[in-house]
Amino acid sequence: MVKPVISPTEDVFLKPARGTSRTVRKVQNRIHETKDKKSLINVPYRKLISSTMAKSLAQDILHKLEEEKIYRNSGYTAKQLATDLHTNTRYLSAVVNSRFKKSYSSLINEYRIKDAVVLLADRRHRSKTIEEIGLMVGFANRQSFYAAFDKYVGETPRNFRLKFI
């Protein structure tokens, strides 16, 4: 039985053979580079980010949320946040998912609801309607505010407010 020169598991494109033309070597190198890129496609972004970079990005996200209160702008997107933090949306999403254990929109809504709870319980904001408070904390409409409030607090904003009046 004749033994094959190349086993089925060997990668023939790892190293261009001696004596091959320059064009053939370029094509082989391009195929090898493409293969490397394709092997990274299925790797989750959170595994491609170093822990120090992820920690730094998480701190920057917290600063934007807690100090600058970006969540109050209903039109502020993950893309805008990524641009502000000089990164891309995939890295941003990976850090939010891995460090905060939730999606970008869930994180933003959580901060909005925490803010709304404070405003609804504060007697100084009694003259504001519930819809106005929802708009103040960054919700685009009444329905999304009520749905998120019920999800995080377990009751409607109206019932919650009645406890403090």
Image (cartoon, rainbow, N blue to C red):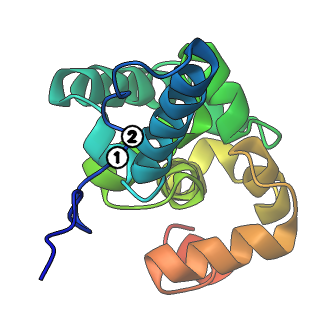
Question: Do we see residue 127 in this rendering?
Answer: no
Tell me the amino acid under the disc marked 1.
Val
Do the CB atoms of the residues marked 2 and 1 lie less than 8 Å apart? yes
- Position in image of residue 26 (x %, y %): 57, 21
Number of numbered discs:
2
Taking the view exactly as shown, the residue that stands out farthest to the right is 141
Q: Badge 2: how crowded within 10 Å, few (<14), some, or many (20+)?
A: some
Rendered residue at 71%/27% (across/down): 80
Q: Is residue 95 left or right of residue 33?
A: left
- Give 155 or 66, whichever is nearer the viewer: 66
Question: Do we see residue 98 in this rendering?
Answer: yes
Residue under numbered circle 1? 12
Rendered residue at 17%/30% (across/down): 51
Looking at the rendered image, the quarter that the C terminus falls into is: bottom right
- Give 115 or 123, whichever is nearer the viewer: 115
The image quarter containing residue 139 is bottom right
Tell me the amino acid under the disc marked 2.
Phe
- Position in image of residue 121 (x %, y %): 51, 57
Q: Is residue 64 left or right of residue 14?
A: right
The image quarter containing residue 18 is top left
Looking at the rendered image, the quarter that the N terminus falls into is: bottom left
Q: Is residue 4 left or right of residue 30?
A: left
Identify the disc placed on residue 66.
Answer: none
Rendered residue at 36%/24% (across/down): 57
The image quarter containing residue 159 is bottom right
- Give 158 or 89, whichever is nearer the viewer: 89
Q: Secondary structure at mark 2?
A: loop
Q: Secondary structure at mark 1?
A: loop
- Give 8 or 78, whichever is nearer the viewer: 8
- Compute the Cα span from label 2 to label 1: 4 Å
Identify the disc placed on residue 13.
Answer: 2
